Amino acid sequence: MDKDYRTDKENKISITVIRRLPKYYRYLGDLLDKGINRISSQELSKMTGFTASQIRQDLNNFGGFGQQGYGYNVEELHGELGKILGLDSVYNAVIVGAGNLGQAIANYKGFEDAGFKVLSLFDKNPKLIGLRIRDIEIRDVDTMVDFIKENDVEIGIITSPRESAQELAETYIEAGVKGIWNFAPTDLDLPDDMIVENVRLNESLFILSYFLKEKYNR
Amino acid sequence: MDKDYRTDKENKISITVIRRLPKYYRYLGDLLDKGINRISSQELSKMTGFTASQIRQDLNNFGGFGQQGYGYNVEELHGELGKILGLDSVYNAVIVGAGNLGQAIANYKGFEDAGFKVLSLFDKNPKLIGLRIRDIEIRDVDTMVDFIKENDVEIGIITSPRESAQELAETYIEAGVKGIWNFAPTDLDLPDDMIVENVRLNESLFILSYFLKEKYNR
DNA sequence: ATCATGATGTTATAATAAACACAAAATATA
DNA sequence: TATATTTTGTGTTTATTATAACATCATGAT
């Protein structure tokens, strides 16, 4: 523990590094599946498109996982990255907004495999309440706060229309979720220390559009 | 083949700038809706969280849209950004993978409002073929290439499982789409000049997880 | 056991991006 | 009309991020 006298700010790892970690994790998972148990930064570079130097630097932010002259042990590195990303524990989540997008997320087995368990969907539409997606029930949004408190829900997912997103986010916080995964195309105005990850489908599509325009009708 | 005669390095705008444009566009749209017709970089800064200086620099990559002592005309700037992002023309799109996610996108009115028209969904599941989402028919994926060629489809959207994404992307290219919007959690291996925008839901969720772990240390 | 090779961890350098700062130009005011 | 104020556009500086370089050490061949 002799390094930990440093303040949080000094050893805070930049978001640009963190956003590369899932990609490393994914490729390492692929290698594991193929039964490959040894990998060098150079080979990872070819796969991921990042430079070998950058990969080594990125990984070294979290510790020296490799061995000189050998490379990295795939299983070990995959496991370490999983821990760093918090994929070694199970999170309970709920979804508010049980439309197609909410249902798509509830349906997607990949999230559960990664340790994110959707316990319930919530909606205000009476026609949806009571239905089940896989074995996940859609409940009345009015019961959401109680459900979250009773079931140790840590992640609140917002797949509602834009108009209701802010209010629902505040409801989530009131209920005690620790993080919000927001799909509504708006910026939530929440306390600074609240953890929010936005998925901005609109913006992503606009970027695609930008490059189309740049390439084809300048 | 016809490589650009322009030395495209000298006027190429960095992707970090481009990724901010949709946010400017969104806030300007909000201002328009509120009937506000004048805005300064400082006020935009408060709204968007970017610094006023950065906003001015970003916009100046595309031209001097503002006026000293006044600021920016909201309607004009909104329009200009729309043009830059290619939102002034209509794009035809199709979706392959008619599960919940594909249906969610087909259902989302916001994309159509921005000029992206989904003409058809495609799937290989016979139970889905023939169904309609809004007025959009789900067709057999085997008919996709012909459909794309006959209907001037420019954007191919992939909402299939990971395993089939690469093959479907190649099919899209064969059929002549100009850009691919990929939701499958894989890196498509395609010609360098192909325009691809990935939406990585998995990675986004992992980032959320990372910050949860960092903050709560579990 | 020795030595050439390979590959990391880490420091040094380069490239990129963001922030600062201010002249110039327009607006608002009186 | 004169003048104080506002705010852009842009040159300059600082900060951040990425790449290159390399000393070091494990490995594997002989």
Image: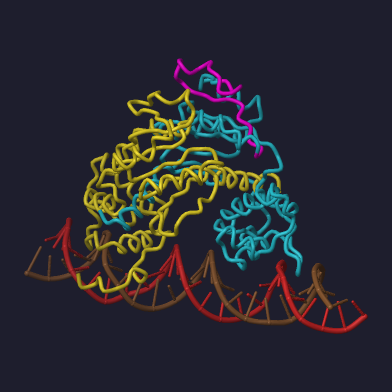
Chain colours: A yellow, B cyan, C brown, D red
The residue under the point 53% across, 15% down is: B130
Does residue C30 appear left or right of residue D23 in this picture? right
Q: Position of residue B218 (x, y in %)?
A: 25, 53
Above or below, comparing residue A199 to residue A128 in the picture: below
For the residue pair A14 and A68, the one nearer the viewer reads as A14
Q: Is residue B161 magenta?
A: no
Which residues fall within the magenta stretch?
B114-137
For the residue pair A207 and B42, the one nearer the viewer reads as B42
Q: Quadrant of residue A10?
A: bottom left
Q: Position of residue B45 (x, y in %)?
A: 60, 63
Q: Position of residue A8 (x, y in %)?
A: 33, 68
Above or below, comparing residue B24 to residue A151 in the picture: below
Q: Quadrant of residue A57?
A: bottom left
Does residue C3 appear left or right of residue C14 in this picture? left
The residue under the point 53% across, 46% down is: B192
The residue under the point 45% across, 57% down is: A191
Q: Quadrant of the N terminus of chain A?
A: bottom left
- Note whether residue A76 is visible: yes
- Note whether residue A30 is visible: no
Does residue A150 appear left or right of residue C3 in this picture? right
Does residue B213 appear left or right of residue B141 in this picture? left
Count of numbered labels shown in the rendering: 0
Q: Position of residue A22 (x, y in %)?
A: 36, 49
The residue under the point 62% across, 58% down is: B12
Q: Is residue B134 magenta?
A: yes
Above or below, comparing residue D22 to residue B213 in the picture: below
Q: Quadrant of residue C2?
A: bottom left
